[in-house]
Image (cartoon, helix red, strand yellow):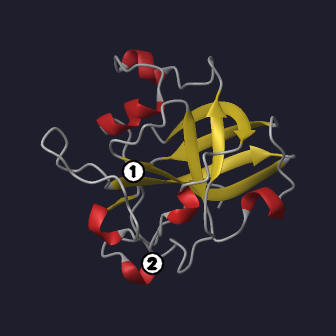
Amino acid sequence: MNSIVFKGVVTNGVGQHVELYVPGRDEISQAPSDWPTVLCKGSLNIQIAADGYPPIFKEWGLQDSAKSLDAKRFPCAFEVAQREFGNNKLVPNAEMLHRGSAQVWRAVLSANDQNIKCWVLRRYGSGLAKQLELLSDKHLRNEYGLQDGQAVVVTFLGSIADGQTVAGS
């Protein structure tokens, strides 16, 4: 499986991701060559539609929730350790030793008749159950004219080796 697809709408986040410092390519030991050197502060939040989860979740026995991504069934491009973030308030605990660390997937946001390259970041233990957080070196909302309530599709791309390209990139 090379991709999984989520459908939803652009929504406002809780405004706390802007406080989280997400390190750039030169600051992460596992970062691939196409991970931005500097990321735009904050994230673009996508509210997943009730019927917008990938059908494969059911086959995998996963709930329709962004929290199901924590099960690591769909391979990410790389992970970011909890300690590599700045101002990361999600910290490991006895129940989840990797809490606050994150999986990162290459993704394509389809909106306004455009296919926009971006990244999805999901921190283990995040309370977000119905939202995806998209990152880029650009301010996605402003750069591409995205509006709250606008229908979008987010395609997660499977893990590829550093230096390889994904079809359409």
Inter-mark Cα distance, 1 to 2:
16 Å
- In this view, 143 is above or below 157: below
Horizontally, residue 131 falls left or right of residue 22, namely right
Image quadrant holding the N terminus, namely top left
Classify 63 as above or below 107: above
Image check: 70 left or right of 144?
Answer: left
**Amino acid, disc 1:** Cys
Q: Secondary structure at mark 2?
A: helix
x and y percent of residue 19 in the render?
52, 64
Determine which quarter of the picture holds residue 94: top left
Mark 1 vs 2, N-terminal side: 2
Rendered location of residue 74, percent (x, y) = 38, 39
Q: Secondary structure at mark 1?
A: loop
Residue 25's tag is 2
Q: Which residue is mark 1?
A: 76
Q: Nearer the viewer, residue 5 or 160?
A: 5
Q: Residue furthest bottom?
A: 26
Which three-letter amino acid code belongs to the residue tagged 2?
Arg
Taking the spot 47% from the left edge, 68% from the top edge, the residue there is 22
Nearer to us: label 1 or label 2: 2
Which residue is painted at 60% across and 46% down in the image? 14
Q: Which mark is residue 169?
A: none
- Could you tell me if residue 166 is visible in this image? no
Q: Is residue 152 left or right of residue 95?
A: right
Residue 152 coordinates in the image, percent (x, y): 74, 38
Question: As rendered, which of 15 and 63 lies closer to the eye?
Answer: 15
